[in-house]
Amino acid sequence: MSTALVWFRRDLRLADHPALEAALAEHAHVVPVYVHSPDEDGEWRAGAASRWWLHHSLAALDASLRERGSRLVILRGPVLDALAGLARATGARAVRWNRVYDPGGIARDKRVKEALREQGLAVDSTNGSLLFEPWTVKTGAGDPYRVFTPFWRSCQRELGSRPPPRPAPLRLPLPAGAPDGLPLAALELLPRVRWDAGLAAAWQPGEAGAAARLGAFCDAGLADYPEGRDRPARSATSRLSPHLHFGELSPRQALAAASAAAAGTTGAGVAAGVESFLRELGWREFAHHLLFHYPHTLAGPMDARFAALPWRDDASALEAWQRGRTGYPIVDAGMRELWHTGWMHNRVRMIVASLLTKNLGVHWLEGQRWFHDTLVDADLANNALGWQWVAGCGADAAPYYRIFNPMLQTERFDPERAYVRRWVPELARVPDKWIHQPWAAPADVLSRAGVRLGTDYPAPVVEFKASRDRALETFRQLRGDAANPAVERPRKSSTSPMRLRKA
Ligand SMILES: Cc1cc2nc3c(=O)[nH]c(=O)nc-3n(C[C@H](O)[C@H](O)[C@H](O)COP(=O)(O)OP(=O)(O)OC[C@H]3O[C@@H](n4cnc5c(N)ncnc54)[C@H](O)[C@@H]3O)c2cc1C
């Protein structure tokens, strides 16, 4: 009666779980194991919001396992010692897991795999997190892609051949004498100072929460998605990102559910929504493709010229940005949404990232680190891609001259100002014409709205036009590009934290 260990990481689900399915097919008993080993994640160990999510996701996984006659064995790292010890204790002959694609994870997994094999264990890994393995998508010349559109076109040709998602197993036989492991609480993933009420109100971590959100989005959200996805005040995007990050949902499940919605309707709106949604899943694939092939982009620019950019070391500007007190209402709204819910709308992520890197001149890594700590969907690949895209130094980035104008962005994408009013309530009574630029409002307007600029709400930490011009000049010099760049025009559409928590 053989036994296998299944090591859970970024795949905290039971359905469409290739490693679990393979273990069950080949072994009579399976031991589901989670190893807590933050030291092995180095600089990019899980941030506070991710730890909160992880706690609840592990609890949900354990509950699902118990419904099937099993349970999650939680151990402390180092990973190799934990897995080798558990194999000895249970008599397991095999270890299986689904792959991760960040540089640190790949190096650790390789080391663990080799060492376990040397100890006589059969070790195998599978793809449970991506639609396409990064090494399978290649240009005509056999190279990795660096530009999204041809990458996604190439993926689209193969989408139809993705295997359908597999159901969760009904039973998971645990071997007699499997150790209890640690109680979840021993990992101390939840914050001691309970700042997490907003997260709890906004999310349901775990496989059931993921399935509910995917179902609701595919039932009612797809038709509005192409247009609504750029409106932060509307709940028009799927909000699946943390579920996808923690693998409570596989991209194959998302692909299958969206494709089924398209097949079940004659409405052009839903079909357009599905195409647009799949394209976003394509960006996720692209981010993992890039990080796999260009691991240095986790903390360095893809475009080497940008390593020479003179970033400003401005702690007070950074703190104003982190606290949502820059004086730019849409930026502050986004940073407060992030603080409160652990998530921020994609449009607003771009706006806040542009202000930090272009106008405040603060290194994008500061923003990346802050997002890593505060986002519930903090994802090494997607976060690195997002920051370098906005900063203009990534593979397929926004051109360096794109500097998001927070006022124009508000007019276009928050036309009713509902998003700003929700997250910056101190400005709620300022009329639409001024709420996104309160410094420009006549004194009597502000006074009627009960706002004293600099007291109730900050004056801008940086003057927009002058800082934009400065940034453009710096970028232009760096590129040796004397051409006068275009700047954003009104009509065109384009595409340590604990210190503050305690404060
Ligand atoms: C500066 C910056 C940092 C970002 N950091 C992260 C991060 O740490 N983790 C993260 O998951 N996303 C990140 N993104 C991408 C994007 O903002 C989020 O994925 C999206 O807002 C999640 O909301 P949603 O699930 O409703 O997205 P939807 O619009 O419903 O998209 C569906 C899924 O596609 C994927 N996706 C969507 N947009 C992108 C994108 N631009 N890049 C990669 N994948 C995408 C996500 O998995 C998402 O859940 C970042 C973007 C920027 C500009």
Image (cartoon, rainbow, N blue to C red):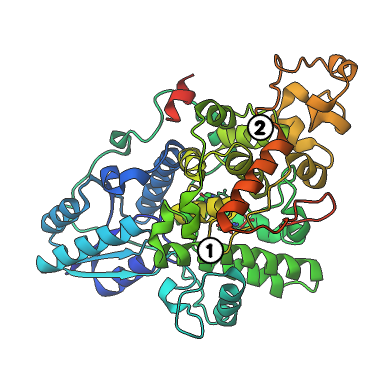
Disc 2 to disc 1, how far (Cα)? 28 Å
Question: Is residue 489 shown left or right of residue 388?
Answer: right
Q: What residue is shown with label 2? A: 332
Helix, strand or loop status at disc 1: loop
Q: Quadrant of residue 426?
A: top right
Which residue is depicted at the point 45% across and 83% down? 142
Q: Does the residue labelled 1 lie within 8 Å of ligand 1?
A: no
Which residue is depicted at the point 47% across and 73% down? 132
Residue 344 visible in the shown view: no
Residue 244 in the image: state x and y as whole percent.
Answer: 50, 56
Q: What residue is shown with label 1? A: 395
The numbered mark, 2 or 1, whose residue comes first in the sequence reads 2
Which residue is depicted at the point 59% across and 58% down? 480
Helix, strand or loop status at disc 2: helix
Residue 465 in the image: state x and y as whole percent.
Answer: 74, 38
Q: Amino acid type of disc 1?
A: Ala
Question: Is residue 21 shown left or right of residue 460?
Answer: left
Residue 63 in the image: state x and y as whole percent.
Answer: 39, 47
Q: In which quarter of the image is ligand 1?
A: bottom right
Q: Amino acid type of disc 2?
A: Asp
Residue 392 in the image: state x and y as whole percent.
Answer: 58, 54
